[in-house]
Amino acid sequence: MNVYDGERMAELMAAEGMTATDEANAADLVVLNTCHIREKATEKVYSDIGRLRKHGSDPMIAIAGCVAQAEGAEIVRRAKVDVVVGPQAYHNLPKLVADAAAGKPALDTDMPAESKFGHLPARRRSGPSAFLTVQEGCDKFCTYCVVPYTRGAEISRSFARIIDEAKALVDGGAREITLLGQNVNAWTDTDGRGLDALIRELDRLPALERIRYTTSHPNDMTQGLIDAHRDVEKLMPFLHLPVQAGSDRVLKAMNRSHTADSYLRLLDRVRAARPDIALSGDFIVGFPGETEAEFQETLRLVDAVGYAQAYSFKYSPRPGTPAADMAGEVPMEVMDDRLQRLQASLLRDQKAFNDAAVGRTCTVLVERAGRHAGQMLGKSPWLQSVHFDTDARIGDMVEVEIVAAGPVSLSAVERMRAAA
Ligand code: SAH
Ligand code: SF4
């Protein structure tokens, strides 16, 4: 979502006559779009500001994103920055930049009921794979998580606006659209339609080849959405469905409102609808009070699922969340050890998933040039990175045979070029 928000901020500033540069030294304005989810991400902001200021070019610095939302004026006290803008206020970035240039204070962390999306410029250009935010915020209040405080309450964009933006992205070159939301499968509209209705409508856009969505919550996984995985060919066989832990006591303390068993039964239903679906998840080790036996329940759940890929984190206490005040802090070396063991299991399963692809044919959407001349890189339907030699161009759909698998990517040979 930060990538999406970053693109939208770049488009806003482009409408003001600015152009993007990859050279921080050459920039008049640097926008740091920040993440507050774990302490490490937050601290990175301050080291990045320090690095930018050391170069001597002295650009205007704007802090956007969830650190801006959570820390607000505190950032201005701690570091030399010009603009602070929260994730629900960034449509005001051009005005804030103008204010800062005029020497006025420039801080906006409002969360207006009226959505920022109505104030953003129309989409014009897109890479082959585009993001599209359809839902924001969270009402789930998992006890470890800052998202409900930094992104605000759950809101869904309107059906018509989303379809308009999707059409603009496809006209601008997108072949794949990933629908985004903190709880994307909680998307709903005033007619009571769910994410599956949106997916079925996108399916009707002829030039759109692929649809994905992320991130989902197990409790919002409706039968309609599961059925869409059975019916809609453009909906890719991949589901990122975070579980966080395998112990029901820990899940309850996290306020996850699902159990290990209800999660596994849900996956059974998803697999019944789409047997080849690749599963992905998020995990937290070392939640307050987590015992070794409870951690082993996470390992057992991982064994039972066989994830194609996953993200795993050490628990990071976040100020203002209920878990930050819970007793039973897990020592850092215990967390390190658990994370290593968990990641070994996840990597084993990821490798097995990739190995199983060897010998199969599949379609790859070409996203960029590879390391050597003639090599291109793209994604399989199961979100694996695939590289192969071809004279296909970015945005082409190419049928390949997978010939070798590494832990993080596959190599392939081209079979025949699908008509572009
Ligand atoms: N809405 C999504 C995820 C949003 S945050 C969901 O509920 O699945 C992305 C991931 O960051 C979470 O799934 C969780 O695994 C991790 N995370 C969130 N807060 C954390 C914390 N305080 N410490 C460690 N990891 C955390
Ligand atoms: Fe955070 Fe996701 Fe839980 Fe919401 S559902 S509180 S975003 S982990």
Image: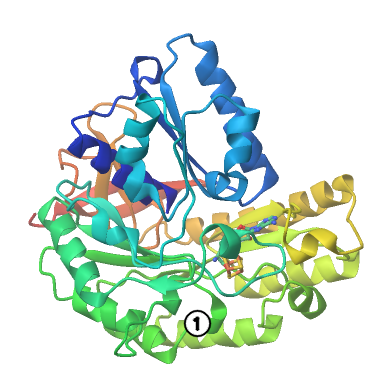
Would you identify the image quadrant in which residue 19 lies? top left
- Tell me if mark 1 has few (under 14), some (14-19) or many (20+) residues whose alpha carbon lies within 10 angstroms of its own: some
Q: Position of residue 210 (x, y in %)?
A: 25, 64
Which quarter holds ligand 1? bottom right
Q: Residue drawn 49% across and 50% down?
A: 109
Q: Position of residue 265 (x, y in %)?
A: 60, 88
Q: Is residue 268 left or right of residue 336?
A: left
In the picture, the quarter occupied by the C terminus is: bottom left
Q: How many marks?
A: 1
Q: Position of residue 362 (x, y in %)?
A: 29, 61
Q: Is residue 102 left or right of residue 296?
A: left
Would you identify the image quadrant in which residue 134 lies? bottom left
Q: Is residue 105 left or right of residue 92?
A: right
In the foreground, 92 or 159: 92
Q: Is residue 138 left or right of residue 300?
A: left
> Residue farthest to the top?
56
Q: Position of residue 184 (x, y in %)?
A: 43, 71
Residue type at mark 1 is Asp
Asked if residue 115 shows in the view, the reply is yes
- Label 1 element class: helix
Which residue carries the number 1 mark? 220
Asked if residue 276 shows in the view, the reply is no
375, above or below 259, in the image: above
125, above or below 259, in the image: above
392, above or below 241, in the image: above
